[in-house]
Image: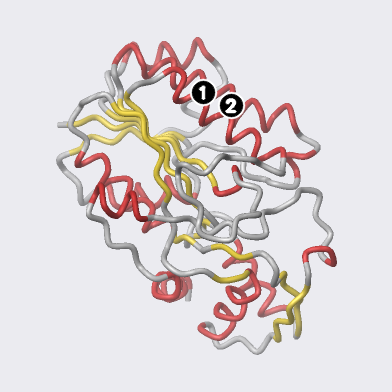
Amino acid sequence: MKKILVTGSNGQLGSEIKERASGLPQYQFVFTDIEELDLTNKEDVNNFFKQNQFDVCINCAAYTAVDKAEDDRELALLVNFEAVKILTEACSPHNTFLVHVSTDYVFDGTNYKPYEETDPPSPNSYYGLTKLKGEEAVFSMSDHAVIIRTSWLYSSYGNNFVKTMLRLGKEKEQIGVVADQVGTPTFAGDLADAILTVIEKYNGEPVNEIYHFSNEGAISWYDFAKAIMLESSLDCKVTPIESKDFPAKANRPFYSVLNKAKIKTDFNIEIPYWLDSLKLVLKKLS
């Protein structure tokens, strides 16, 4: 029986993995968040790994407040880089297979076609920079690791764009949403399924790979908001605005669609279309 540690398990992705755990008796899951395991405390993490032999670690822990990271740089770097470094160092001596979740924000968004794993990263926000440094820490310290970059994550758990739009749709008659940033919404449950497939097919051999995963399709935040209102039968009018008219501390990629051919080929994964997954989540939230 594989023993799997899930860090940051109270977040959107961790909660989706929890939901699936009861249907996976072949695995023994250990779910932790900062209360049970502070990843920024090297001594605690090392002791935790000495007391528990893990076959796999899924790192869902992250500092994800993109705008706040511009000011709160010390904490963003601590969580997205230093903690990742500590966790990777703890995994390495035990050959614990590490699945680390990263982001489309490691790219600057100037591409004209979906980003492949081999495209050079060039973050244009401090959040993106800290996530890139986390990726580099993983690969410099482990030869049993996979990084999965994802985008625009949402779920019925936690705080996210879908829940914000549902709230605003009930409170307001009209809202403006940026229409010049294009990417792909990703249902955290679909990402959880993909990660569990990667783990199931992992054979214990050394590995250092980056994969991209998001739902299928490409839309703007404006399109996403329109779909949420329409599928939820909300009367709130959504109007398109430009990024320059929406005050935000951090720069966002204007185009961050991810090419998913590699993960689909390597793991025989069929990825759902973004609208199909959105409908499932809205049904759950209704």
Question: Viewed as shown, does residue 272 lie left or right of 125?
Answer: left
**Residue 278 falls in which quadrant of the image?**
bottom left
Q: How crowded is mark 2: few (under 14 residues within 10 Å), some or many (20 or more)?
A: many
> Is 54 rendered above or below residue 20?
above
Colour option used: secondary structure
Residue 84 in the image: state x and y as whole percent: 51, 26
Question: Viewed as shown, does residue 124 lie left or right of 157?
Answer: right
Give the Cα distance between marks 1 and 2: 7 Å
- Identify the residue at horizontal 69%, vertical 29% (top origin): 75
Question: Viewed as shown, does residue 17 lie left or right of 155?
Answer: left
- Identify the residue at horizontal 25%, vertical 47% (top origin): 266
Q: Check the picture and name the quadrant holding the N terminus.
A: top left
> Is 216 rendered above or below residue 197?
below
**Of 203 and 119, which appears nearest the observer?**
119
Please identify, in this view, whether the residue under mark 1 or under mark 2 is nearer the observer. Answer: 1
Residue 193 in the image: state x and y as whole percent: 31, 53
> Is 112 rendered above or below residue 80?
below
> Is 266 rendered above or below residue 230?
above
Q: Which residue is denoted by mark 2 in the rendering? A: 81
- Identify the residue at horizontal 55%, vertical 80% (top origin): 227
**Residue 63 falls in which quadrant of the image?**
top right
Q: Type of residue at label 1?
A: Ala
Residue 216 in the image: state x and y as whole percent: 41, 66
**Of 7 and 116, which appears nearest the observer?**
116
Residue 281 in the image: state x and y as whole percent: 44, 69
- Identify the residue at horizontal 59%, vertical 82% (top origin): 229
Whether the residues at callouts 1 and 2 have beta carbons within 8 Å, the answer is yes
Q: Type of residue at label 2?
A: Phe
Residue lying at the far front in this picture: please name it.
112
Q: Which residue is denoted by mark 1 in the rendering? A: 137
**Of 174 and 114, which appears nearest the observer?**
114
